[in-house]
């Protein structure tokens, strides 16, 4: 999370949030739109509502789904103005299901060619699953608004199956409003969402903070692309215990900090439930030349556990795997934090060994430990063109070591993981990113 302060954006967000909290008697009902019309969204959602693909929706304020389900049809475009976001509260639900040829797009309200990160906020889903802390207010807003709370009613209390809704074939672009130090709106935020939540085929692109941040809960993620996030690709905290398969994190020149930044809980590293996601088939591409932000594949700290299998880690200038703090180091020694059957390349200038990391974990030697009996290897993944900023290709070439089935592990058959993915990295011989992702510069 970056230390940024944008006073004008905070003022805009506070003012807009205040408008959003006004009583119903002060808000005029929306006029019935006609086909092809641009619809300005200036009220919150309190009943089942559908946004239709024949119209473009412009967020004029932070819009809260307070109750009911917001359904967004395939191919719908939602534009966010400065200081806005879409927030689905614990009592609401989102049903945003696009298709490969008709993805749903959340993007900046500015004209094409004038769009930048920080143009608007992002998409936030809040649920009632367990955290390892008391119920929280989601970051990015001033606290005190009960609609912004997530969690199940107290530390280690809640419904781990809670359904926040569906996001499928969705792009979220140019988001990430910074409002206070360490308190930003991420492109996609999941707070306390449970296992019935469906997040599949989702791309976040050119956000100013994290691509996807998950606070507690058990939401599962599949087919995720985080392109050019200015902070971390995937960030978790507060006891996240979901499953992830097919994850791509792409940094750009001087763009991006950690591929993964993982915490359990900052002030009580061993709080329960402990963060312990299970991740299969991921590709992390850094910026090998360095920049103003440190480019590190994974920072695993503050008591997090978790297992990662069939991972490509390539082109990170400042570090590979930093297991930070004695609590996470103990999780590693106990086998609850592990990286196996993975491929490393061009890390801090080395193609033969993991770079040494700062001793911030009581003497754990990550570089030595990660190559012991875990089938990790050093080899060029030979991806198509993972460095392109406008048309990347993450598919390995035929001769790539990533496609050698004997080097990979078979994902577990538990109803979520695709057990046929016996390759290393997020993409095998079929490119699941084709047809619905996009990489606009502005």
Image: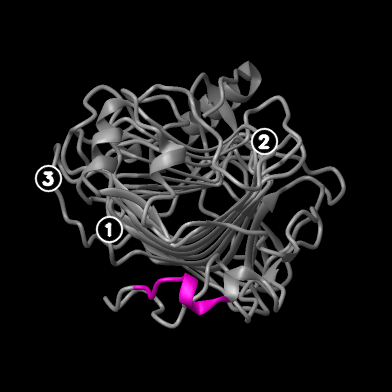
For discs 2 and 3, the disc positioned in front in the rendered view: 2
- Note whether residue 40 is visible: no
User: Residue 317, which numbered label?
Assistant: 2
Q: Residue at x 63, y 20 (%)?
A: 6
Is disc 1 placed on a helix, strand or loop?
Answer: loop
Q: Secondary structure at mark 3?
A: loop
User: Is residue 55 found left or right of 274 in the rendered image?
Assistant: right
Residue at figure coordinates x 77%, y 39% from the top left: 253
Residue denoted by label 1:
194
The one of 390 and 411 positioned closer to us in this rendering: 411
Badge 3: how crowded within 10 Å, few (<14), some, or many (20+)?
some
Distance CA(mark 2)–CA(mark 1): 35 Å
Foreground pick, 213 / 241: 241
Q: Residue furthest right?
A: 113
Decide: few, some or many residues near mark 1? Use Cα within 10 Å; few <14, some 14-19, many ≥20: many
Magenta residue check for 410: yes
**Dot 3 corresponds to which residue?**
157
Q: Position of residue 96 (x, y in %)?
A: 50, 67
Query: Is there any visible trace of residue 252 in the rendered image?
Result: yes
């Amino acid at each position: 999370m970056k230390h940024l302060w944008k006073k004008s954006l905070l003022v805009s967000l506070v003012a807009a949030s205040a408008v959003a909290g006004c009583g119903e008697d002060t808000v005029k009902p929306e006029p019935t739109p006609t086909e092809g019309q641009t619809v300005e969204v200036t009220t919150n959602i309190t009943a089942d509502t559908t946004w239709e693909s024949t119209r473009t929706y412009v967020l004029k304020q932070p819009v809260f789904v307070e109750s009911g389900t917001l359904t967004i049809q395939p191919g719908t475009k939602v534009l966010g103005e400065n200081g806005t976001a879409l927030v689905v509260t614990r009592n609401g639900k989102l049903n945003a299901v696009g298709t490969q040829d008709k993805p749903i797009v959340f993007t900046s309200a500015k004209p094409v060619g004038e769009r930048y990160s920080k143009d608007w906020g992002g998409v936030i889903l809040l649920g009632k699953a367990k955290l390892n802390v008391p119920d929280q207010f989601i970051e990015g807003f001033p606290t005190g608004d009960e609609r912004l709370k997530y969690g199940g009613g107290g530390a280690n209390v809640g419904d781990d199956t809670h359904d926040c809704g569906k996001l499928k074939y969705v792009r979220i672009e140019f988001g990430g409003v910074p409002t206070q130090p360490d308190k930003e709106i991420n492109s996609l935020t999941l707070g306390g969402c449970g296992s019935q939540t469906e997040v599949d085929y989702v791309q976040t692109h050119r956000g100013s903070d994290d691509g996807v941040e998950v606070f507690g809960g058990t939401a599962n993620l599949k087919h995720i692309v985080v392109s050019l996030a200015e902070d971390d690709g995937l960030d978790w905290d507060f006891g996240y215990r979901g499953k992830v398969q097919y994850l791509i994190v792409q940094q750009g020149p001087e763009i991006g900090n950690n591929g993964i930044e993982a915490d359990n809980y900052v002030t009580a590293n061993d709080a329960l439930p402990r963060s312990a996601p299970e991740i299969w088939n991921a590709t992390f591409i850094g910026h090998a030349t360095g920049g103003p932000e440190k480019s590190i594949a994974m920072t695993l700290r503050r008591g997090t556990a978790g297992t990662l299998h069939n991972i490509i880690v390539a082109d990170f200038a400042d570090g590979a795997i930093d297991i930070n703090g004695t609590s996470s180091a103990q999780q590693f020694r106990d086998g609850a934090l592990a990286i196996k059957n993975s491929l490393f390349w061009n890390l801090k200038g080395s193609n033969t060994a993991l770079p040494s990391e700062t001793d911030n974990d009581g003497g754990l030697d990550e570089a030595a430990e990660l190559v012991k009996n875990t089938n990790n290897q050093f080899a060029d993944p030979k991806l198509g063109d993972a460095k392109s900023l406008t048309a990347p290709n993450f598919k390995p070439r035929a001769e790539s070591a990533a496609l050698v089935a004997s080097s990979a592990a078979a994902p577990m058959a538990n109803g979520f993981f695709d057990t046929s993915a016996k390759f290393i990295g997020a993409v095998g011989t079929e490119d699941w990113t084709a047809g619905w992702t996009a990489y606009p510069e502005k």
